[in-house]
Amino acid sequence: MTRDTMESIPPSRIQQYVTTASATMGALALGSVIGFTTHCVAQLIAESPPNSNSDLRITPPEASWFASSANLGAVVGGLIGGLAANHIGRRGTLLAVAPPFIAGWLMIALAYNFALLIAGRVLTGVCMGAVCSVAPPYIGEFASADIRGTLGSCFQVMLTTGILYAFFLGAVVGNWRIQALLCMLPPGLLLVSMYFAKESPIFLLAKGKDEEAEKSLQFFRGKNYNIQEELKVLKESIEDAQRNSFSLKDLKQSYVLKPLLISLSLMFFQQTTGVPAVMFNLTTVFRASGSALSDDMSVIIIGIVQVLATGGAGRQAITAAVMALGNGGFSFANRTSSPLPDQRGAPVSAIGVIPLVLLVVFISAFSVGLGPVPWLMMGELFPSNARETAASLSTACNWISAFLITLIFYPMTTSLGEHGTYWVFGCICVLALAFSASVVPETKGRTLLQISAVPHRPHNRRDTQVDQVPPGSEDLRPSFPRDSRQEFWTGRTTWLKEVLVRQSCAWRRKVLLLLPYLLRGILGYSRNSCWSAVGARLKKVMRSCKDPVTLRQRRS
């Protein structure tokens, strides 16, 4: 085969899909950890009926710690995973977490007291955090730019599949010990599948293993694809990154700080919208909502909907998805707090399916927006020399938020009620919508080079353009000027800044002039007064704002 023919052949995708499936076995194991507590807690709490097949009893406060302790372990696991990925590689780290993952499930299955339950959950949580900090960047490093979004969303798809797997086991098996033993299967699959996978070519180049890196890149791109040009670009990128080694002081640099703040915010909103807390306690939530369907049937339906909804939308759909998430939360709050009566004044059993329908909207919106997007962004936003550290910090933020939300879920429902809890989650959804619409950049179709373009190197010229990057290349050199990078990061906030600068003075004058009359109107309304006089005064003030003489008099 001639060189020209090889250059015309596009890169193969088969090995990228296969390796992604292997890496996301960790997400399957992660999902089983999240979904395990749904049925297990209902069997373990002290008020469980005798036929719950549970020979171990815990109190509701202990149940909160049992559900949230995995998140606490994941905080530590996220930090350990980032360090391990730098020393033994991405593939090596995923291989290393599989045995302790299995050991954690074995501890839970054989636990005879609450301490062993917590120890097993913490150990599975540590492995869970390590998987989250390593698998998404690993996928992002070997994936071609045109399919990176698809491959990145597979992590969330497999996570939701793992949740469904745990739901199904809980409904069919009915014994939490047997369920824990069967949850050892996903980490076992991770161990076997990653044994045959290849290490990331970027990691191998960073360790000076050029020959192995070439074989790895050829494996991911296909044997007939000419990788020489892409390999050359990757080598130059790694050498440049090594000359500018990353330290914690570099977190203050804008090229790291901006994407890190975006990633931390997305991770925070992902957990504080309430979906993870609901998923940890789904059976309890359905019982409190008065659903007419059985707990097992409702939980399985939610799991199926979550799997089908995940990955079904582009990254720009995050704004619409979070809005639907908030609306679903509000609707679910209304249904929980205000059961609908029929015409005879008695509760209507036919509307008992409404909690399920509203929760489906709630979970579906999460699955196409805040579910996959933070993990996808974590593998794309950070430059190569800061990726492991930044990914560890983002993962730690995610699990700290999950731990706190899951821990306080029961106290919130006790003090605020079911309706008050979901109103709080709904308000957070609105904040997440505003943040994603104004700050989160669009990365679809961009190479890692264009997303993470490192601006701190002295040899970069502001007004120069580097050569075209070959298809599938993950070069980290900037491919567009610094001014363009600034515009890329400001994104949709540019228009808002212009409006604020242009209109701020005028609006401040109007607000200050109208504020006394608005307060007077509010007080008058509280006394059942008429708003007509206040409205007339407001119109007069608005007209006077356009008169420069009046404005000068008011300033003086």
Image: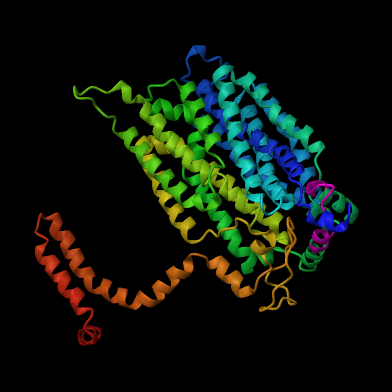
- Residue sitting nearer the eye, 552 or 76: 552
Which x, y percent locates residue 5? 83, 55
128 and 31: which one is in front? 31
Residue at 22% x, 70% y: name it: 514
Quadrant of the image containing the C terminus:
bottom left
Q: Is residue 384 magenta?
A: no
Q: Main secondary structure of the magenta part?
A: helix
The reply to whether residue 309 is in sight is yes
Report whether residue 64 is seen. no
Answer with the quarter of the image where residue 170 lies: top right
The boundaries of the magenta stretch are 219-233
Q: Nearer the viewer, residue 535 or 184?
A: 535
Quarter location, residue 545: bottom left
Check if residue 230 falls in the magenta segment.
Answer: yes
Residue 2: where, in percent of width, then height?
A: 88, 55
**Residue 17: image x %, image y %?**
71, 41
Residue at (43, 44) in percent of width and height: 325
Q: How many marks?
A: 0
Question: In x, y percent, where is residue 99?
Answer: 76, 33
